[in-house]
Amino acid sequence: MTWRAAWAVAGKDLRVEVRSRYALGSVLPFAATMLLAFGFALGPDRGLLRLTAPGLLWLAGLFAAVDLFARSYRSEADAGALDGLLLSPVPKGAVYLGKAVAATAQVLVLMVVTGLLVAVLFGLPLGRSPALLVLTTLLGVVGLSALGSLFGLLTVLGRRQAALPVLVLPLVTPVVIGAIRATGTLVQGGTEGVAGWVGVLLAFDAAFLATGFLVYGHLIED
């Protein structure tokens, strides 16, 4: 029942996103603008741009995704639908998992498109291990979405959306660092140390998902 409810919540959130096209219409242009600003700030040195491209990719994706996390609850809060989540006869942890799955899908699309922009603008090579690169991207996005889906609820309940970056960014730093280091190694054609960073991403993903699943019900009821 837990996974059935989680998939139902995820499907609902994704249908809402498809109708609104908010990620494509607002979040993606924001990420592209950040990339252009970073590129102009670093100058015309192509070598420097390629060296810093993995970090720019993940930072642009992170800052652009923060708004998606709050938005997944904003429309429900405005319409009073959060009461429906509270009264629904399903495990509250399932609602959290559904929110996290939907956020993961949206942020993953955002990261893929942003990655293509980085490859075009900065000449970022794709590396020789596409499977590991995909795995790193997926694990990094899961970590961001697991934490963002939890704190997105807190900011909407408290009507303090501006506090979301303050809450999310410090805690998600290990995930971002691990994703940047692994991505940087892979796009340069190497694999040394990648397994360790993938292990770090797995550990934090599991910790964030378990914490969110266990505490979500208490947060939404309070």
Image (cartoon, helix red, strand yellow):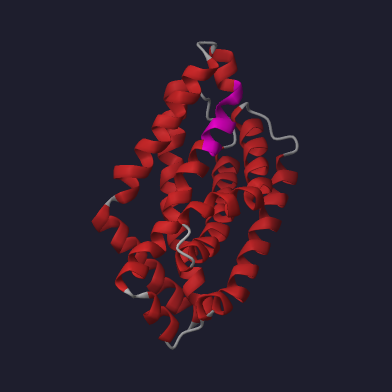
Residue at (37, 81) in percent of width and height: 84
Q: Say whether residue 185 is magenta.
A: no
Q: Quadrant of residue 188?
A: top right
Residue 123 in view in this figure? no
Residue in the image at 50% along x and 24% along y: 38
Say if 142 sits above or below 43 in the image: below
Q: Quadrant of the C terminus?
A: bottom right
Q: Is residue 54 magenta?
A: yes
Using the image as rendered, state which of residue 207 and residue 187 is in the foreground: 207
Residue lying at the far left of the rendered structure? 19
Question: Residue at the bottom extreme?
Answer: 89
Which residue is painted at 71% across and 44% down in the image? 197
Placement of 150 over or under 58, stated as above or below = below
The image shows residue 191, relative to residue 157, as above or below, that is: above
Q: Position of residue 37 (x, y in %)?
A: 45, 24
Question: Range of the magenta residues?
Answer: 51-59
Residue 155 screen position, x and y as percent: 49, 62
Write down the quadrant of residue 120 in the picture. Answer: top left
Front residue of this view, candidates 135 and 82: 82
- Judge left or right: residue 114 versus residue 131: left
The quarter of the displayed image where residue 133 is located:
top right
Q: 106 or 126: which is nearer to us?
A: 106
Question: Magenta segment, principal secondary structure?
Answer: helix
Q: Position of residue 187 (x, y in %)?
A: 59, 30
* Residue ranking furthest to the top: 44
* 51 to the left or right of 161: right
Residue 142, image x, y percentages: 55, 55
Residue at image x 34%, y 75%? 81
For the question of whether residue 44 can be seen, the reply is yes
